[in-house]
Image (cartoon, rainbow, N blue to C red):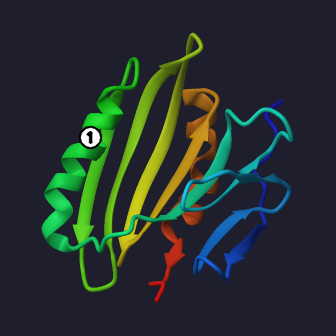
Amino acid sequence: MTEPLPNILLIYQNPEWLYELRRPEPWHERPLDVENGQGVLFSPDPVDTTTSLSVEVRDLGTEVTSDDLSDLVDAFVAGLEAVPGSYIEQQQSFANEYAIGIDAVQTYDEDGVRRKRWIKLLYKGSTQARLIAQAATVEEYDRLRPLFAPCMTTFMLAARS
């Protein structure tokens, strides 16, 4: 029997890096080491992180503008395509007065297993946030997608001064 999806999302807030993320209530939290930034990962298992929701936020040291979007998309897609067995199922980007963003859903091969993930990059000023919702298998990702969707789509990032 498949374990039911968690039905409670908590709000993780980071007042230093000015972001907010919804995350599954029963999942385990662990910090991520991020150069020039901060990160956190949530997973259903305290040790195995092949299924997880993570965010890494960093200061790029330079302001990102909508003029940079095509170069950002090219680099993002090239990076995804370099992953073994990569197939980009969907990809989109946007730029508006609030933020610049790119996201994709990708399947790929890792340790002999076909995996799936949703990756989102958001830029505000000189801050970059990278969110990843991934699962140990394609089937597990498809099962968890209703849980991942509100976590990925309600992420909020404020400009740091």
Residue 60 locus on image (x, y percent): 40, 64
Residue 159 locus on image (x, y percent): 44, 84
Q: Is residue 127 above or below residue 118?
A: below
Which kind of residue does numbered mark 1 sit on? Answer: Val
Q: Is residue 64 above or below residue 134?
A: below
Residue 37 locus on image (x, y percent): 57, 63
Residue 38 locus on image (x, y percent): 63, 62
58 or 77, nearer to the observer: 58
104 or 98, nearer to the observer: 98
Q: Is residue 61 left or right of residue 1?
A: left
Q: Quadrant of residue 103?
A: bottom left
Q: Is residue 103 left or right of residue 55?
A: left
What residue sits 48% from the left and 84% below the top? 160
What residue sits 33% from the left and 65% below the top? 101
Q: Quadrant of residue 82?
A: top left
Q: Quadrant of residue 47?
A: top right
Q: Is residue 31 left or right of residue 45?
A: left
- Quickly name the residue at label 1: 77
What residue sits 36% from the left and 25% below the top? 86
118 or 36, nearer to the observer: 36
Q: Residue furthest bottom?
A: 161
**Secondary structure found at label 1:** helix
User: Which quadrant of the figure contains the N terminus?
Assistant: top right
72 or 49, nearer to the observer: 72
